[in-house]
Every structure is written in C-alpha cells, then in structure tokens.
Amino acid sequence: MHKYENISVPVIRRLPRYYRFLGELLQKDVTRISSRELSDKMGLTASQIRQDLNCFGGFGQQGYGYSVRGLYDQIGKILGLDHNYSAILIGAGNLGKAVATHMSFEKRGFQLIGIFDSDKSKEGTLIRGIPVTDIEELESFCSQNKTDAAILCVPKTSTPQLAERLYQLGIRNFWNFSHYDISNMYDDIIVENVHLNDSLMILCYRISDANDVPEA
C-alpha cells in the first residue's frame, strides 16, 4: 500500500512548485508565510494551498502561518529528495548532454552514476565528469551497480528494445524523453514522460487563443 495513494495527481504535481518557491523565500531570509501570502505570490487560492498541504498533515499554525524552512524540509521529504536514488542516462547526444550537464540531480533525489551511448566514437568522453560507456556494457554495469532509474534520451524507434533490456535488468523507473510511451509495455513500472514539443504546442495554443479576439 502506498503511503499517499489517495492523493490526487494534480496535488502531487504542485508539490515541486511549492518546494521551488519556498526555496526562493529561504534565499531571501523569509522565515514564515501565511497561506494568503503564498496564494498572492503563486497564483493559487489560499483555500487550495491549505487543502493541498492538509493532504500530507498539518504544517501551519493558527495566527502564525507556515514556517518556510519547516515546510520546505517537509515537502522535500514527501517528494523523497533525501533518498539519493541511483540513475543511469541512455543517449549522449545533444539532449542527453544537456540533461546530464544542467540538471541538479543531487538536489532532486538522484545520483547520476552512468551514461551510455551506442556511438562508439563517444566512448570515454566525459560528461559531468562521467565517462560515456558503450551501450553493450549495460548489462555488465547494472550487474555491478544498483540502478534505481533510467533516463531515456534516445530516438523513439530505439526505445522499445532498450526498455525491454532495462526491464529485464530489473529497472522499473524511467524518466522518458523518447516520445515513446513505454507505460503501455508494462503494468508495473513508474514513468515520467517529458514531451517538450507538447509543451511548446500548448504555448502556441495559449498565444493563439489570447490573440483570437472575436470580431464585434
């Protein structure tokens, strides 16, 4: 049974935003904040914020509000950022390099322990201080290193076969940039799909919608 299995997905997806915003407040030496102040700054209603946070316990105090440090630390624990899960990245192309180089893995609950690519000319190249390893060494590496998650930065056509290899190696958690929905392949895996093109199209829609003013 999952600890928070009754929590809705929209609430869970708002947690990183709370965490990020509270971190910004800490950098400004803000020690406490009310749900009303949070709502003004985050564009959510005070009622929504209280409902979200009450899903995980009572963090506020009547007449005081929320301790910024306390709430920041509690949300970090709820998100599991203190677990330090091990992850490997597959695909050392432009996207893979960008993800490996610019993501704050250690601050987001993960440690990147390996990077793999099928292009033998990339073997030994250092990215984030980690040497790129030939994908043929994947089984050997995973047999010697506990791997909690895989980050897929590979072409869509390569994903099904690669996902099967990783699944057979016991990996059940994926951060998937490939645009291939591997969640349809297995019913016992956890997948977070990242569709940058979808996000860009949503921006396009919102701009178009705002500009399409009906004629009088």
Image (cartoon, grey):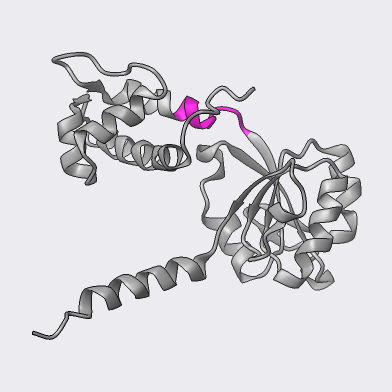
Q: Residue at x 56, y 63 (%)?
A: 98
Can residue 5 be seen by looking at this rendering? yes
- What stretch of residues is rendered in magenta? 76-84
Q: Residue at x 51, y 46 (%)?
A: 104
Looking at the rendering, in which quadrant would you find the N terminus? top right
Q: Is residue 77 above or below residue 198?
A: above
Looking at the rendering, in which quadrant would you find the C terminus? bottom left
Q: Is residue 41 above or below residue 50?
A: below
Q: Residue furthest bottom?
A: 215
Can residue 134 be seen by looking at this rendering? no
Task: Judge from the rendering whether residue 76 lies leftward or rightward of residue 161; answer left or right.
Answer: left
Q: Residue at x 46, y 36 (%)?
A: 8
Q: Is residue 102 above or below residue 203?
A: above
**Horizontal and vertical percent for residue 66?**
24, 22
**Horizontal and vertical percent for residue 9?**
48, 41
Give whichever of 199, 210 is nearer the camera.
210
Location of residue 62 (image quadrant)? top left
Location of residue 158 (image quadrant)? bottom right
Q: Residue at x 36, y 43 (%)?
A: 17
**Horizontal and vertical percent for residue 106?**
55, 39
Give whichever of 143, 182 is nearer the camera.
182
Total marks shown come to: 0
Q: Residue furthest left?
A: 216
Location of residue 115 (image quadrant)? bottom right
Task: Judge from the rendering whether residue 83 lies leftward or rightward of residue 211; answer left or right.
Answer: right
Give whichever of 216, 175 is nearer the camera.
216
Magenta-drawn stretch contains 160:
no
Q: Residue furthest top?
A: 62
Magenta-drawn stretch contains 79:
yes
**Horizontal and vertical percent for residue 52?**
35, 31
